Amino acid sequence: MPQPGHHVRQCPICLKLIEHADLVVFDAGELVHQNCFVQSGGTYALVMEFLRRRAAASFCHSCLATTLHVAYDEVRKAVTALRVDREVVVRVGAECGICRQRRVTVQTTNPLLR
């Protein structure tokens, strides 16, 4: 039951309530459960937004999957699509901005302008 003064928000995809601790994405003016967003093809946008906000660094697929709470294969598919669209570059042997391991990483070619 919502507390007085708090809005009840419902995910437009699954129609379930969005709880206080739920992971969400703000998409087209609406809050959406992150899992619903990913399952509806939103991983591309999620990965792109993450990379654009951290344009100075590159990240390995494993850390992207863990950080964004999405499956490794979904990250791999999104990165492939981003490569085709020339939105990212692949760096072999670059240091991942999260785990600091030298791996195959991706970095945006289109940083978010402030």
Image (cartoon, helix red, strand yellow):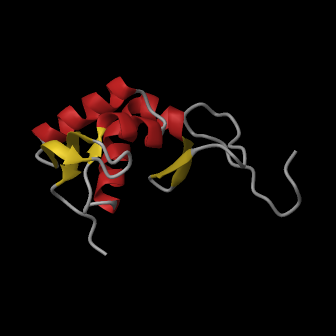
Residue 6 left/right relative to 83: right
Q: Observer-nearest residue: 96 or 73?
A: 96
Spot occupied by residue 73 in the image (x, y as percentages of width and height): 33, 24
Q: Position of residue 96 (x, y in %)?
A: 29, 47
Q: Could you say where residue 10 lies in the image, as x and y percent from the top left?
A: 66, 43
Does 88 sit above or below residue 55?
above
- At horizontal 33% and vertical 33% (from top left) the residue drawn is 75
Foreground: 52 or 62? 62
Report the quarter where the C terminus lies.
Answer: bottom left
Q: Residue 64 in the image: x percent, y percent?
A: 37, 40
In the image shown, does 1 or 108 lie closer to the viewer?
108
Quarter of the image for residue 32 reads top right
Q: In this view, does 39 lie above or below 28?
A: above
| Image position of 59 with respect to 75: above or below | below
Residue shown at 83% from the left, 64% from the top: 5
Q: How many marks?
A: 0
Left or right: 36 in relation to 106: right
